[in-house]
Amino acid sequence: MRISFHGAAGEVTGSCTLIETGDVRFLVDCGMFQGGREARSKNLHALDFGFDVRGIDFVLLTHAHIDHSGLLPRLAVMGFRGPIYATPASIDLLEVLLLDSAHIQEKESEWQLRHQHRRGKSGGVQPPLYTVIQAQSSLQLLKPANYGETIHPAETVKVCFHDAGHILGSSWLEVTIGGEGRPRKLVFSGDLGMRNRPVLRDPDPVIPEADLLVIESTYGDRLHRPMQETEDEIVAAVGRTQACHGNLIIPSFAVGRTQEIIYLLADLVRRERLPPLKIYVDSPMANTATRITLAHPALLDSETNDLLAWLQTHPAKMKIEFVADVEQSRALNEVRSGAIIISASGMCEAGRIKYHLRENLPRSECSILIAGFQAAGTLGRRIVDGARLVHIFGEPVPVRARIYTVGGLSAHADKAELLDWARGFHTPPRHTYVVHGESAASSTFAQALRDELGWANVNQPTMGESVEL
């Protein structure tokens, strides 16, 4: 068996792992690289993937986030025709996320072309990795796999999807490969969520033993703030901004994070830690993702279902306006105080959030609440790192607003939670590969597996590395 790491090795994005046995070849995830110009160049380099696309038998998708799914349409463009297995909730989200990804790429190419024309130049414009039509076509390859049910994507392969508690429909994978000799058990963590967090159920515990573990390490070198501190920070941000007569802008991932922030704000109102609120959710994708979330009540935890019932009986306590129309979104830029605006994208690289940041970052009475991971090279990362001047749409924008960084809302397990999940193995996996983390985070977590759990064979793969097992 050969395992090849074609992404998320020494970095957080671009998850793509190729597994090859004597008679089957399949991928776990096929994600897009994210994080500024370097990511764009990596995605362009991935145009041919570095392996025979037509020889891939099937794809297993851990969840719908673009850094795990975003190159699936490109895979289909290059000739892949096999099934892509994902949970039903992930499939619902992919119908939104992949089309949005294609739309953004088409718009970026159009902007580059106009920019070249204005400069009197021609050529040098990169076409999108895939178009909206191509993304729509790739959706036909999706096949549902329910939690806890064993599927047989190939004669010698069995797969079971388990709840990872990261975003709606997210999974960690239990893969059994048969054939000659003893069957081998492979576990892919995907992205693991935190226990005892709002909205989603907790991650399912891991199986007792495995021959191979591929585990994420996004926050493998740190602990998240306790939820109490997170709530205190949110209350402080809302209170300070209201007192200063400014706006509170919250960049948020459309899937998962937006719904969690809505939950926390509503719960703080219910517990009277915050006054009644009016919130604008200015992201068509977040609006759709919220609708999809509500369509899967069985995947939500009991606390969330209780809060939803409370909101229905107390409509005046929490007013949420889902902004869809572009003109309505633009009108929000005229609001000078009292607005709480949740908008995508979460790393501030695209979407309507950039307009809200352009309008509100220069204003000292406003606040920006950063509530998620910001990859190196992104606008969000520059803001978190304390930049006093950023560029948005090519224009300089001074940073005078108060910046709040809330660490307790991450959809990723922190170091302690990752270690607790890994402790579920009765015996150490024979081979462990630590991925999906910046180099320092992966290195720290790999050493923690050795030191705290006593695991011996723990490795950090490099981009493009292949290992024989």
Image: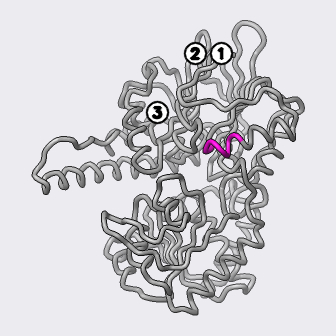
Q: Which residue is mark 2?
A: 24
Which is more toward the observer, 260 or 388? 388
Q: Which residue is mark 1?
A: 468
| Disc 3 from disc 1: Cα separation | 30 Å
Above or below — where is 141 with respect to 156?
below
Image-based side of 249 in relation to 194, left or right = left
Dividing the image into 4 quarters, which one contains the N terminus?
top right
* Amino acid, disc 2: Val
Query: What crowding class fits label 3: few (fewer than 14 Cα within 10 Å), some (14-19), or many (20 or more)?
Result: some
Tag 3 near tag 2, CB within 8 Å: no
How many numbered marks have been drawn onto this rendered protein structure?
A: 3
**Colouring scheme applied when the structure was drawn:** one colour
Residue positioned 61% across, 45% down in the render: 438
Residue positioned 59% across, 57% down in the render: 373
* Amino acid, disc 3: Leu
* Amino acid, disc 1: Glu
Mark drawn on residue 94: none
Q: Secondary structure at mark 1?
A: strand
Q: Position of residue 303 (x, y in %)?
A: 76, 67
Query: What crowding class fits label 1: few (fewer than 14 Cα within 10 Å), some (14-19), or many (20 or more)?
Result: few
* Mark sitting earlier along the chain (3/1): 3
Write down the region rendered in magenta: 437-443
Q: Is residue 288 visible?
A: no
* Mark sitting earlier along the chain (3/2): 2
Residue 455 figure quarter = top right
Residue positioned 21% across, 41% down in the render: 124
Tag 3 near tag 1, CB within 8 Å: no
Q: Is residue 139 visible?
A: yes
Image-based side of 412 in relation to 36, left or right = right
Q: Main secondary structure of the magenta part?
A: helix
Residue positioned 54% across, 84% down in the render: 278
Q: Which residue is mark 3?
A: 141
